[in-house]
Amino acid sequence: MAIWVDSSTRVVVQGITGREGTFHAIKCKEYGTSVVAGVTPGKGRIVHEGFPVFNTVLESVRAEGANTSLIFVPPAGAADAVMEAVDAGIRLVVCITEGVPVFDTLRVRTFMKGKSARLIGPNCPGIISPGKAKVGIMPGHIHKEGRVGVISRSGTLTYEAVGQLTSRGIGQSTCIGIGGDPIIGTGFIDALTAFKEDPDTEAVVMIGEIGGSAEEEAADYVKRDFNKPVVGFICGQTAPPGRRMGHAGAIISQGRGTAAEKMQKMQECGIRVIKSPAEIGAAIQEVYSKK
């Protein structure tokens, strides 16, 4: 069973008439995902690259049964796009947009409290359950259906991890790029909880970064409640304090959030920590051999 995306996923692409929205709507459809509509205000009632376009998400829900949103709206409008999707009854919102103001994301998080919808992102590659559905920008051809879950703050390292697993014949159950912003919708613990309950997931790769405390909190959760093996890696091991590395959330502040601290905590909590992303495939293979 896939988590959050599967054959029942029906995607509406917000911002579909933009270059990115068009390209990735087509790629998701080619992968086999049911992309049922697009939304661009003021362009409703046209058909764009074979997709019916609506002025609002609610119209796409009523007309096409959309239950998942993929957002390519520019940063200034991304928060409003997320809230519109949630208001329309969308159950899963995947926001790819990079550069969303932190205050806007905080506003979205507050708005979503008490609601059943889930947000992945912003500033993320999305989610894929190989062989079932892809909602995002990840290259579908590198994935293989299997039983290893992948969670990552880094989109690029998500692809690296997947490439190594697939090259060794190890398939993935679901891969989630949670995004590298300081405030995001779905965190490590959310994804780990889903993987814990997913019978198709036997092991997990968790890729974190410097900055914040999400990885340490996830490590505590693994020690306390997670009963499947986890391989962990932390990006930014040579980053100097006070300098942002790649993502808005990847910054060592006041001496906290260093790679060394995160790696030590993860090891203490029973996670198999590796020092290089080149070791991901071998580490998972080792986990399987022990099983």
Image (tube, rainbow, N blue to C red):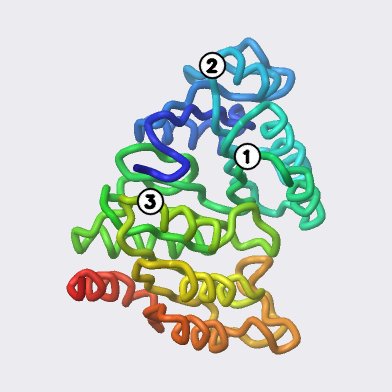
Q: Which residue is mark 3?
A: 198
Residue depth check, mark 2 versus mark 1: number of the one nearer the observer: 1
In three-dimensional space, the C-alpha distance between marks 2 and 1, rounded to whole angstroms, equals 19 Å
Residue at image x 66%, y 16%?
Answer: 59
Above-or-below relation of 85 to 105: above
Above-or-below relation of 42 to 248: above
Residue at image x 59%, y 77%?
Answer: 210
Q: Residues within 10 Å of mark 3 (few under 14, many from 20)?
A: some
Residue 262 percent across, percent down from the top left? 55, 82
Identify the mark nearer the N-term, 2 or 1: 2
SS type, badge 2: helix
Q: Which residue is mark 1?
A: 117
Residue at image x 58%, y 59%?
Answer: 187
SS type, badge 1: loop
The answer to which image quadrant residue 183 occupies is bottom right
Q: Which residue is mark 2?
A: 64
Q: In the rendered structure, which amino acid carries the disc numbered 2?
A: Glu
Please tell me which residue lies in front, 239 or 229: 229
SS type, badge 3: loop
Residue depth check, mark 1 versus mark 3: number of the one nearer the observer: 3
Please tell me which residue lies in front, 179 or 264: 264
